[in-house]
Image (spheres, rainbow, N blue to C red):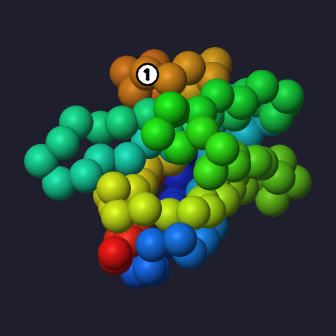
Amino acid sequence: QVQLVESGAGLVQAGESLTLSCVVSGLTLASHAVGWFRQAAEKEREFVATISMTGSVTYYGNPVKGRFTISRDTAKNTVYLQMTGLKPEDTAIYYCAAAKYPRPVARDYNYWGQGTQVTVSS
């Protein structure tokens, strides 16, 4: 059974940092890309970042470029999302998801976590 479990939820002030973790089980992380998406209240799910199976390729959504960093530790079956310079508009539920290739489109991802809430106050 494939499971992706996010952690690192929190309430922070604007300008602060937060790191999310996604622990993957039931599939070989070394042969899958992992992406992060987010969904704010009453908005569509939005692409945040993705990393290839080797970690050599990363893509970021425009709103987070230069502020967020995605990385992976295959030995720990974990993917991280380091978020710096957080803004109130980053407030959302953050989801990690696994796919064969690192694409910025949610429908390309087969497995999803339950999400973790990030709230940024002004």
Q: Position of residue 10 (x, y in %)?
A: 45, 78
Q: Please tell me which residue is depicted at 33% across the width and 56% down the height of the picture.
A: 89
Residue 48 shows in this picture: yes
Q: Amino acid at mark 1?
A: Val
Q: Position of residue 93 (x, y in %)?
A: 34, 58
Q: Is residue 99 above or below residue 39?
A: above
Q: Please tell me which residue is depicted at 47% across the width and 39% down the height of the picture.
A: 63
Q: Is residue 112 above or below residue 81?
A: above
Which residue has dot 1 on it? 105
Q: Secondary structure at mark 1?
A: loop
In the image, farthest residue toward the left: 42
Q: Position of residue 3 (x, y in %)?
A: 52, 51
25 sits left or right of 46 in the view = right
Q: Tell me the quarter of the picture where residue 101 sits.
A: top right
Q: Please tell me which residue is depicted at 75% across the width and 53% down the height of the picture.
A: 77
Q: Position of residue 31 (x, y in %)?
A: 76, 28
Residue 31 shows in this picture: no
Question: Of 51 and 92, which appears nearest the observer?
Answer: 92
Quarter placement of the C terminus: bottom left
Q: Please tell me which residue is depicted at 60% across the width and 39% down the height of the picture.
A: 65
